Image (tube, rainbow, N blue to C red):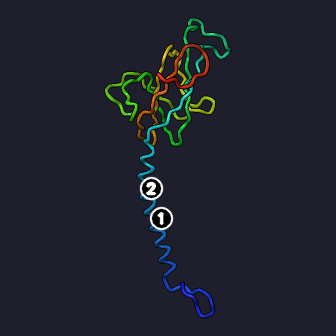
Amino acid sequence: FFLHNNNTFVDPPGLVQTTKTMMSTTTRLLSLLLVPLVTTASTDRPTFKATARVKQHMYRTGQLVDGEEHLLKAIIKWDPMNGAEKYQLCHNCNHILEDTGAEDGAVDGDIIEVEADNFCGGQACHVMPGCPQGHNKFHLRVKMDGEWSAWSNYQNFDVKEPGNFDHEEL
């Protein structure tokens, strides 16, 4: 832009169009640079801070289920992840490397599929009837953009009696 003799700005021919083209090209280049960040973020290892609620097997009426008085069900809950298509919990798996979340050898626990829209009280969850008493270890992974993340660090719950529990170190 140039200052004209009557103190008004004058646009030299093509300057505004050239500036618009440069801004458009810059925007496109930035969006291409950000694409790898978005796609790799989908497979990041999830942060798994779970809680567990343990209940006895009961009918909806509140009556204990006959013959199942000794059984407990665990409700494992965690914060939902934006963009999750599905979750998997690995129950009592020892083949997962804690520092990376990678699998080391054959699966030695139970992998449980959990739909992304499965909620309990506003949190993603899985209800596990017949949960064994004692220490129960869980890892979580999430499927985003068609790819599974690495496994999370484990969360451990000592299932003994009905109540609410947080992670307990082994």
Going by the numbered disc 2, the residue's amino acid type is: Leu
Q: Earlier in the sequence, mark 2 or mark 1?
A: 1
Residue 34's label in the rendered image is 2
Going by the numbered disc 1, the residue's amino acid type is: Thr
In the picture of the structure, the residue carrying the numbered disc 1 is: 27
Toward the right, the furthest residue is: 61
Give the spatial CA distance, label 2 vs label 1.
Answer: 11 Å
Rate crowding at label 1 as few (under 14), some (14 to 19) or many (20 or more) other CA atoms within 10 Å. Answer: few
Quarter of the image with the N terminus is bottom right
Indicate the position of residue 45 as horizontal and vertical percent values: 44, 38
Is 94 situated left or right of 27 in this image? Answer: left
Indicate the position of residue 15 as horizontal and vertical percent values: 49, 81
- At numbered mark 1, what does the secondary structure look like: helix, strand or loop? helix
Nearer to the camera, 130 or 2: 2
Q: Residue at x 39, y 34 (%)?
A: 99
Do tag 2 and tag 1 residues touch (Cβ < 8 Å)? Answer: no
- At numbered mark 2, what does the secondary structure look like: helix, strand or loop? helix
Q: Residue at x 46, y 21 (%)?
A: 170
Indicate the position of residue 159 as horizontal and vertical percent values: 53, 16
